[in-house]
Amino acid sequence: MTKPGLIVIIALSVAAALFVLFEVAYIKLNGRNVMAPTIPRQVQDFGTGPQLRYLVMGDSTSIGQGTDYQHSYAYQTAQYLGQDHSVSFMNVGQSGARAADVASQQLPKALAFRPDVVLLAVGANDATHLTSGSSLQKSLQAIINGLRQGNPAVKIVVTGSPEMSAVPRFPWPINWLAGLRTRQVNKVYSRLISQNHLVLAPIAQATGPAFKADPTLFAADNFHPNARGYQLWIHVIETTFSQNHI
């Protein structure tokens, strides 16, 4: 190799390393961490009417990280169902969970609870951690199979991944990659919805444009929604419940 060619390679390598360091620093410094809230883990009761056992499973959004728990979609949708039912509600979601974590750690608790309706909200961390499509599908199918073994009549509502390209914490081209991963994750969900007759609450499709247009919908960490952001998701989920007679 000639000396000029070696200099070019070194220069490109240094530039690439500096660019990676900039991206990492931007993600680390662009926003203040928000703590995962401590939420009730025991069964909570809402409303009057026919009995309904409602379970929420998933990641940090399922426990309302970015706001207080009373403004989370888990708590708000439990109250919504309580308008027409006597709801026994339990939340087994965990911050940082991927689909495999839900299958291994949250599913056993779900089986003990024997829910009639499940809201499964996981996918964002699988998108950002580059979980393979085959691994994601395997974990999600295990969750579905397990829930139906516990209660063959259970209604399973899934959100898929939110639109991760809208996250202000991600610089270009990370945000572009996050958008690509959102589509890949939700494509896996699309197959499973068709094969297993699940119900989709399409938060990425329905709220992604709003989050892209308005970064004030995010919490101080520039990653999780805040109370106003979660309210958009709540509307989508409650509309889905209504349209599917849940």
Image (cartoon, grey):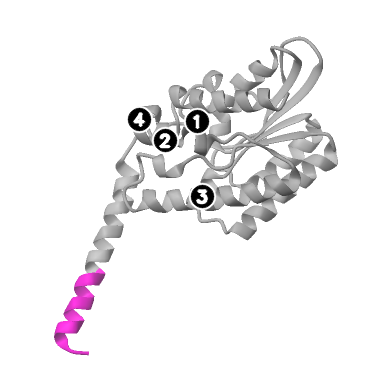
Earlier along the polypeptide chain: callout 1 or callout 4? 1
Tell me if residue 38 can be seen. no
Q: Mark 2 points at which residue?
A: 209
Q: Name the residue under label 1.
A: 65
Q: Is residue 190 above or below residue 230?
A: below
Q: How crowded is mark 2: few (under 14 residues within 10 Å), some or many (20 or more)?
A: few
Q: The disc labelled 2 sits on which kind of residue? A: Pro
Quote the CA–CA distance across marks 2 and 1.
Answer: 21 Å
Comes first in the chain, label 2 or label 1:
1
Residue 77: x and y, percent?
A: 63, 22
Q: Quadrant of residue 220?
A: top left
Looking at marks 1 and 3 on the same chain, the residue that comes earlier in the sequence is marked by 1
Q: Nearer the viewer, residue 43 or 205?
A: 205
Residue at the spot of label 4: 214
Amino acid type at image mark 3: Arg
Q: CB atoms at circles 3 and 4 under 8 Å apart?
A: no
Q: What residue type is labelled 4?
A: Asp
In the image, is residue 4 part of the stretch drawn in magenta? Answer: yes
